[in-house]
Amino acid sequence: MASSDTEKQQTKIGIKKVGASNVVDPGKSLTYQNCKELEDLIKGLVGQNQTRIILDCKNMSFLDSKGLELLLQLHNELKNRGGAIKIAGLNAVCRDILLSTRLINVFFVYEDIAEALRSYP
């Protein structure tokens, strides 16, 4: 019974194609509990040579060290393949986490998805 309750609480990762980009919405905070699912999804896209990825963070209220580690790993992997992961819609807490860890300048961070989409050549 407990496992079905847990399944109901889990939020599915959303993905939509916008032009040549994939907009990925983790649907919740990016923590050690759900990093594997996001990693598998993005690596699947990269395996299909889809390297223009926008992470829609409007539903992400928190980001832990495992989430930061995953973002760095994905950033480097996409960069090596000529792509990029762009981060859009961070709330104040997540933005402060990137500022305090000095990672805000490592990533491509945008106010919203439209701005991130416009940043592509």
Image (spheres, rainbow, N blue to C red):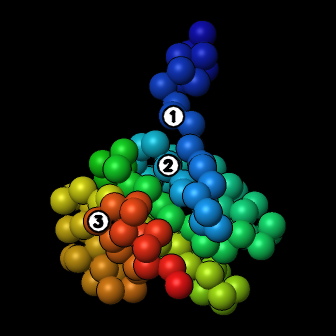
Residues marked 1 and 2 touching at CB (< 8 Å): yes
Q: Is residue 21 left or right of residue 71?
A: right
Q: Position of residue 79 (x, y in %)?
A: 60, 86
Q: Amino acid at mark 1?
A: Thr
Q: Amino acid at mark 3?
A: Glu
Q: CA distance from mark 3 to mark 2?
A: 17 Å
Q: Is 30 or 91 nearer to us in this picture?
A: 91
Q: Position of residue 100 (x, y in %)?
A: 21, 76
Label 3 or label 1, whichever comes before in sequence order: 1
- Looking at the image, is mark 3 or mark 2 nearer the viewer? 3
Residue at the image point whose x is 62% and y is 81% from the top: 83
Q: Position of residue 94 (x, y in %)?
A: 27, 61
Q: Is 19 or 101 nearer to us in this picture?
A: 19
Dot 2 crowding, Cα within 10 Å, few <14, some 14–19, many 20+: many
Q: CA distance from mark 3 to mark 1?
A: 23 Å
Can you say whether 27 is above or below 115 in the image? above
Q: Is residue 46 left or right of residue 4?
A: right
Q: Is 41 or 70 nearer to us in this picture?
A: 41
Q: CA distance from mark 1 to mark 2?
A: 8 Å
- Which quarter shows the N terminus? top right
Residue at the image point whose x is 51% and y is 79% from the top: 120
Residue carrying label 3: 111
Query: How many labels sit on residues?
Result: 3
Residue carrying label 1: 11
Residues marked 3 and 2 touching at CB (< 8 Å): no
Residue carrying label 2: 26
Dot 3 crowding, Cα within 10 Å, few <14, some 14–19, many 20+: some
